[in-house]
Image (cartoon, grey):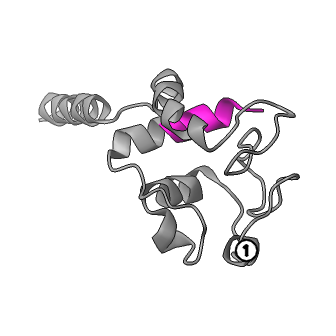
Amino acid sequence: MKHLVTGACCVLAVAVSASARAADAKNGATVFNRCLICHSNSKGAPAKIGPNLFGVVGRKAGTAPGFNYSAAMKGSGIVWTDDKLKVYLAHPGQVVQGTRMTFAGISNPRDVDDVVAYLDTLK
């Protein structure tokens, strides 16, 4: 019986790890290329149509220098954690109603995870 329980636990562990997928920052950089039309991503780069996203993780929303944010974004009270970025990137207008970001969002959850992993590298 002990071997049966141990074997079942091992099978379950393998199944869980196989279904889990680590975010891929390299793919996130590729997906982020769509964002480059509006956002810069290099330290010290000027804002474009949208703010520079270098160092966005951990930053309070509406505070990047050199960008004129909407009142909605400045007043959102958001701090850009990985979890908050994932929700925002999937549905920007729902998370911050009144944002000027017209992008509808990233529909593929894996791409969202990957973009956030990429943004985590921008430090």
- In the rendered image, which quarter is residue 100 located in? bottom right
Q: Nearer the viewer, residue 23 or 28?
A: 28
Task: State the predominant SS element of the stretch in magenta.
Answer: helix
Q: Nearer the viewer, residue 8 or 39?
A: 39
Q: How many marks?
A: 1
Residue shown at 83% from the left, 31% from the top: 43
Q: Is residue 104 above or below residue 26?
A: below
What range of the chain is rendered magenta? Answer: 115-123
Which residue type does callout 1 highlight?
Answer: Gly
Image spot of residue 110 (x, y percent): 36, 39
Screen quadrant of the N terminus: top left
Residue placed furthest toward the top: 26
Q: Is residue 118 magenta?
A: yes
Residue pictured at 46% horizontal, 41% vertical: 113
Question: Is 67 situated left or right of 111 in this image?
Answer: right
**Relative to 120, is 86 on the left or the right?**
left
Side of 48 where 106 appears, left or right: left
Quarter of image, res 121: top right
Percent of width and height locating residue 58: 75, 51
Q: Position of residue 60 (x, y in %)?
A: 78, 61
- Disc 1 packing (10 Å; few <14; some 14–19; many ≥20): few
User: Does the magenta portion include 121?
Assistant: yes
The residue beneath circle 1 is: 77
Task: Examine the image and state in which quarter residue 59 appears.
Answer: bottom right
Of residue 123 and residue 52, the one placed in the foreground of this image is 52
Q: Quadrant of the C terminus?
A: top right
Picture residue at 73% right of the left edge, 50% below the top: 51
Q: From the top left corner, tell me how far across and down residue 67 is, in percent.
A: 81, 56
For mark 1, give the secondary structure.
Answer: loop
